[in-house]
Image: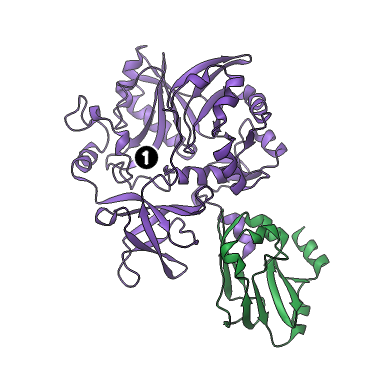
Amino acid sequence: MGGVRDAAMHARIRPGEWVAMSGLLRTALYDLHLELGAKMVPFAGYEMPVQYGLGVMKEHLHCRVRAGLFDVSHMGQVSLRPKSGMVEHAAIALEHLVPVDLVGLKLGRQRYAMFTNDAGGILDDLMVARRCDDLFLVVNAACKAEDLAHLHAAIGCDCDIVELTDRALLALQGPEAAAVLETVAPGVSDMRFMDVAIIDTADGPLWVSRSGYTGEDGFEISVPAERAEALARQLLAHEAVEAIGLGARDSLRLEAGLCLYGHDIDTGTSPVEADLAWAIQKARRTGGAREGGFPGAARILAELATGAARQRVGLRPEGRAPMREGTALFAAETGGDPVGTVTSGGFGPSVGVPVSMAYVPVDLALEGAKLWGEVRGKRLPAEIVRLPFRPSTYKR
Amino acid sequence: MKFTEQHEWLRVEDDLVVVGITDHAAEQLGDVVFVDLPEEGTTVSKDDEVVVIESVKAASDILAPLDGEIVEVNQALTETPAKVNEDPTGDGWFFKMKIEDLSALDEFMDEAAYQAFID
């Protein structure tokens, strides 16, 4: 730390994701971000809005009570097209890389998934949607080059793997998202959480999924890049909608107990440790129709059966001091070695208190148990609590 | 009012130096959610970290601008840290310190110099 002037540099972005401002990519909404007064920062190779005029706190709260528009065009959009022409074959192929039941994924539905490695760690987390002719994947910006290489190497013989670089991705999240999007894309109100559909609009079709990463009801909308700005303006014209930056996106997903790749999950964490076992359906588990058959299956299936050594938990610091990423956790107020580490932490604007996520040994991972986090040399108490910190409002 | 390169303002009131952060610093920090204040009566040296401010974005610290003693802290910030954003140069002050010689303030920037410094 070095005084107030360095504050902006401490934004919750990993040092490895910072690159020189020159050579950064821009999304189709770059000019609109500047027009809206965004503060732009380098993120995963892109120049992205970290906040707009409202600031992180008000943007966060606005999204929870009305609706927020996010530019998530930096994320990778990938179409997996089976060479046989049968989507079933793309699903079978992709099941070799993820522990998720994709054969059982119905047309027009989407599932959360993760690419695993041979050690049972997580290479990236992603969304997979089943459509008529392909599987549509949305992957993290920082991982997309590696993900594409991984897909080509592993299943390139079964599928054409096409990165859709000519499309933007917007997210509209919050309690008024459905009513607002309905005015542009009639029919979206009838979709359920994790439904995907191609919706015809006056300006052409939109690829819509009823999902997001804020814990709110809402939508992600894939749109041809040349139509993205017009669509964003149409949505922002509604009084209910404000543009929301990456800063509030982070605090929203943290309150919702959702993992951020590179922080809460990475190659060193297994899906079971990360408390993501819910994403591994019966068909891929021991005794299932297509048991195993994904990288790291031996470890992951063993952990599903007998539990992992450590687990991701929610942590509620007792006072008002946030316990941020990297905070060491102890089982006692004095002495002993660290038992765990905070992987995400900050202030939760909607819950009004600091909140963190951390990995701790399973014998300590009990709701209500007390741990101590070392903040600036002092051990401060914190309680293990159930995730999410704020109940999600998905339309199931 | 005087200003430091760490974006603090210093104001003399009743022979004490009142310290806070500037409008510019408060804006850069973003919404303040927690302020860790020193104990009243603490003796500090110039550049000691005396206050920690946590905003929605990050943690930052406030350095003691001079050698002296912290004689009063703004307890209201413990419950209402948002005062730092609402009124950084008024209700959002952090602490008052007693220093040996108030003429030590002369070394700091005046408002015009500070404006030039941040522009």
Q: Which quarter of the figure is the C terminus of chain A placed in?
A: top left
Please tell me which residue lies in front, A367 or A315: A367
> Chain B, which colour?
green
Q: Residue at x 58, y 73 (%)?
A: B50
Residue A235 position, x and y percent, is 64, 27
Could you tell me how many numbered marks the image carries? 1
Q: Which residue in the structure is indicated by mark 1?
A: A123
Q: Is residue A187 left or right of residue A131?
A: right
Q: Quadrant of residue A292 in the image?
A: top left
The colour of chain A is: purple
A388 left or right, relative to A221: left
Residue A194 left/right relative to A228:
left
Task: Note whether A241 is above or below A309 in the view shown.
Answer: above
Which residue sits furthest bottom? Answer: B100
Q: Is residue A323 among what the camera can see?
A: yes
Q: Is residue B15 left or right of residue A377?
A: right
Residue type highlighted by circle 1? Leu
Residue at horizontal 45 percent and vertical 55 percent from the top: A325
> Hey, which residue is sitting farthest left in the picture?
A287
Q: Chain of mark 1?
A: A
Measured from the top left, where is residue A274 in percent x and y? 33, 45
Residue A158 visible in the snapshot: no
Residue B3, position in %: x, y? 74, 70
